[in-house]
Amino acid sequence: MIRQIRYFQAVVGCGSFSEAAEQCHVSQSAISQGVQALERELGFDLLERRNRRFTLTPAGEHFYHKSLILMADYERICSESARIAQGPRSVLTIGYLRAYAGPEFQLALEEFSSACPGVQLTIIPGNHEELYELLRTDQADLVLSDQRRAFSDEYCNHILSTCSEYAAVAPRIPIAALPSVSPGDLKNTPCILVTSSSQQETERDYFHHVIGIQSDFLYAENLEKARLMVVSGQGFMLPEGIRDPCSADSGTALIPLVRSQTPIRRNYCTFWKRSSTNPSIQQFFAVLQSKFGSDQLPG
């Protein structure tokens, strides 16, 4: 019956028997027979069929919504039971930049969690120096960070992407109309840094001396608060890891940050100790690397 419910959910979700068959990797007749068998088992119709089209019956609509909850619970029960049967789970601790705004990390976590349910993930946000310390002291197995140091042979260093810097501003302010801005153009607009309280001075020094920001600095402990500060007109922020400016949050405008008309760019990398024996590191790295596509480079 579980398989038949999955077929029914696929048909409703796809709106088509043929597309549901492709999604479930079975023939269209198998999908149709499975739904019919489910209806016979339940004793009522789930679908009202009209030629090649269908609509949910009132009972079918109710069953569909409740079955989604049922299947989510079923899958969790199976996963938890499998973990009990397999014994203690392996653990993978991953650090990532607090201000990382690209979708790749989240997509990788989703795919890895689905493919490796036996691995317990621990996720820790941090600024560059915090992530380096976590890695150095074996508190993290792998980190996603920007490159501020020369690569060390002690670590596996992989450049995932080289990204242009963007200033995120409120769309209503005049600066948002510019095709690009230099740090000097922003000297009268506060720069909002996403950082822990202990790293405020370190982050301020980096963005002032390396990136060239000349304005005053404000601080937010997480990316969401920084975005709200930008939207409310308190300043601009420099979101990390933006590869596609068209994917920016709808509440902000992204302006390329340049120096002498040349885009300011930064490397975003993964790091882990060469001496590590945790097999999940390579598995997660492979998934994460795939999310960056053609941008990936060896480090």
Image (cartoon, helix red, strand yellow):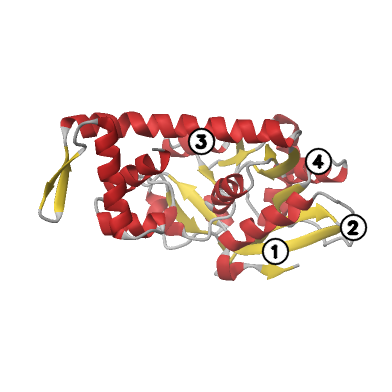
Q: Marks 4/3: CA distance? A: 34 Å
**For the residue carrying disc 3, how many other residues have a C-alpha within 10 Å: few (<14), some (14-19), or many (20+)?**
few
The residue singled out by tag 4 in the image is 134
Q: Marks 2/4: CA distance? A: 15 Å
Instruction: Of the two numbered discs 1 and 4 on the same chain, state the one appearing first in sequence.
Output: 4
Amino acid of disc 3:
Glu
Instruction: Of the two numbered discs 2 and 1 on the same chain, state the one appearing first in sequence.
Output: 2
Q: Is residue 125 above or below residue 49?
A: above
Which quadrant holds residue 77?
top right
Residue 154, labelled with which disc? 2
Front residue of this view, candidates 113 and 47: 47
The residue singled out by tag 3 in the image is 75
Amino acid of disc 4:
Leu
Q: Marks 1/3: CA distance? A: 36 Å
Which quadrant holds residue 81?
top right
Front residue of this view, candidates 175 and 27: 27
| Pointer 1 with pointer 4, Cβ within 8 A | no
Instruction: Of the two numbered discs 2 and 3 on the same chain, state the one appearing first in sequence.
Output: 3
Tell me the residue at 86%/51% (across/down).
276
Q: Marks 2/3: CA distance? A: 41 Å
Instruction: Of the two numbered discs 4 and 3 on the same chain, state the one appearing first in sequence.
Output: 3
- SS at badge 1: strand
- SS at badge 4: helix
Tell me the residue at 42%/46% (across/down).
249
The residue singled out by tag 1 in the image is 159
**Residue 106 drawn at (x, y percent):** 55, 47
- SS at badge 2: loop
